[in-house]
């Protein structure tokens, strides 16, 4: 294959990973003005170094584009003991890291438990961030950063959170627009590559229960997909040291080429949306 043809193929694949651009002259003009600093942008916080903790599998919204639809996962949660072990054993992987609390909807869990989780993170000198749809307010002193996930159907809740943050004199928040979403069921078909060549390993480490998942594909598999496959994947990762209670967790993650079980590569070779030749996007309405 010629170098030019390989470049064109790569560009074609890259375009598949992105949602369709917003159409219209006014949207184009607004984007250009934001880039030039002529009008303010809402984006104020995007964590560069973050470690995920998936707190729960349930939510107070019912978006049709969510990968949970049709899966009916149990309404279970990651325990305080599992989170405490993870925070301790992941120490040093990302110095001064931010722990991003996600779900489901993280504010839907018991608020007493959520406060304890934030305290555990702060006690070890790290910062907390939360990704929320905005429907339940929590005291802002629990968290250092807020990422508001706007779906187009929760604008009133987002506005309420902004007011909540303004009263507390907090400016470090971000608004993340999930107005386009991958068509999960469609995109998990016809994979064209293998996980061993992937460049995204360990970019989005996420704890779910006692297992540490190395990328978003595996985390989605564990949370939303086949219960049988979930148990097999979780068991293999746990046995290979990808678990919260492993005292050598940092070294296990850094040596992922040697430590990841074969099941992990099999999952990404058949399930990863990023490498799908037919990824498509749907508009949230």
Image (cartoon, grey):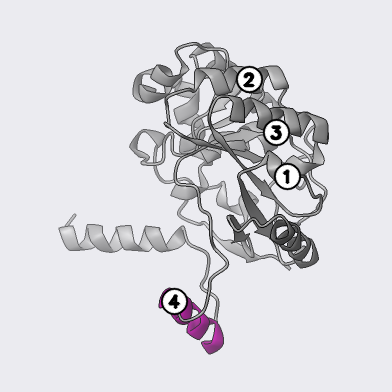
User: Label 1 near label 4: C-beta < 8 Å?
Assistant: no
Instruction: Return the x and y of residue 114 as percentages of the image width and height.
Output: 75, 33
Residue at which label 3 appears: 55
Question: Is disc 2 surrounded by few (<14), some (14 to 19) or many (20+) residues within 10 Å?
Answer: some
Q: Is residue 81 magenta?
A: no
Q: Nearer the viewer, mark 3 or mark 2?
A: 2
**Label pair 4/3, CB-CB below 8 angstroms:** no
Q: Is residue 34 above or below residue 267?
A: below
Compare marks 2 and 1 and give the one earlier in the sequence: 1
| Span highlighted in magenta in the image | 25-37
| SS for dot 2 | helix
Q: Please tell me which of labels 3 and 1 falls first in the chain.
A: 3
Residue at 76 percent of width and 56 percent of height: 63
For marks 3 and 1, give the one nearer the viewer. Answer: 3
221 left or right of 161 in image: left
Q: Is the residue 56 above or below the residue 237 in the image?
A: below
CA gap, disc 3 to disc 2?
13 Å
> Quadrant of the image for the N terminus?
bottom left
Seen at 64% across and 25% down, the residue is 120
Any mark on residue 68, and which?
1
- Marked residue nearer the N-terminal end (3 or 2): 3
Which residue is under mark 4? Answer: 37
Secondary element type, mark 3? loop
User: Image point 56% across, 16% down: which residue?
Assistant: 238
> In the image, residue 236 lies at what x, y percent?
54, 17
Residue where numbered disc 2 is placed: 84
Determine which quarter of the picture holds residue 32: bottom left
Sooner in the amino-acid sequence: mark 2 or mark 4: 4
Q: Position of residue 245 (x, y in %)?
A: 57, 13
């Amino acid at each position: 294959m010629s170098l030019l043809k390989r470049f064109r193929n790569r560009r074609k694949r890259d375009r598949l990973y992105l949602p369709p651009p917003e159409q219209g002259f006014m949207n184009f003009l607004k984007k250009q003005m934001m880039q030039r600093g002529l009008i303010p942008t809402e984006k104020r916080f995007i964590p560069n170094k973050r470690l995920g903790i998936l707190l729960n599998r349930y939510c107070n919204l019912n978006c049709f584009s969510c990968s949970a639809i049709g899966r009916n996962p149990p309404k279970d949660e990651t325990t305080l003991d599992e989170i405490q072990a993870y925070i301790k054993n992941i120490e040093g992987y990302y110095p001064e890291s931010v722990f991003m609390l996600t779900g489901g909807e993280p504010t839907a869990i018991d608020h007493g438990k959520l406060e304890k989780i934030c305290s555990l993170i702060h006690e070890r000198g790290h910062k907390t961030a939360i990704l929320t749809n905005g429907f339940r307010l929590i005291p802002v002193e629990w968290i250092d950063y807020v990422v508001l996930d706007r779906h187009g159907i929760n604008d009133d809740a987002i506005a309420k959170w902004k007011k909540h943050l303004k009263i507390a004199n907090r400016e470090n928040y971000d608004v993340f627009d999930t107005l386009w979403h991958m068509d999960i069921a469609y995109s998990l078909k016809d994979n064209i590559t293998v996980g061993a060549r992937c460049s995204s390993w360990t970019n989005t480490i996420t704890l779910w229960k006692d297992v540490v998942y190395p990328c978003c594909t595996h985390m989605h598999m564990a949370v939303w997909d086949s219960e049988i496959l979930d148990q097999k994947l979780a068991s293999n990762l746990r046995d290979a040291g990808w678990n919260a209670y492993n005292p050598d967790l940092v070294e296990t993650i850094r040596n992922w080429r040697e430590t990841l079980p074969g099941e992990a590569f099999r999952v990404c070779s058949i399930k990863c949306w990023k490498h799908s030749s037919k990824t498509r996007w749907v508009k949230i309405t």
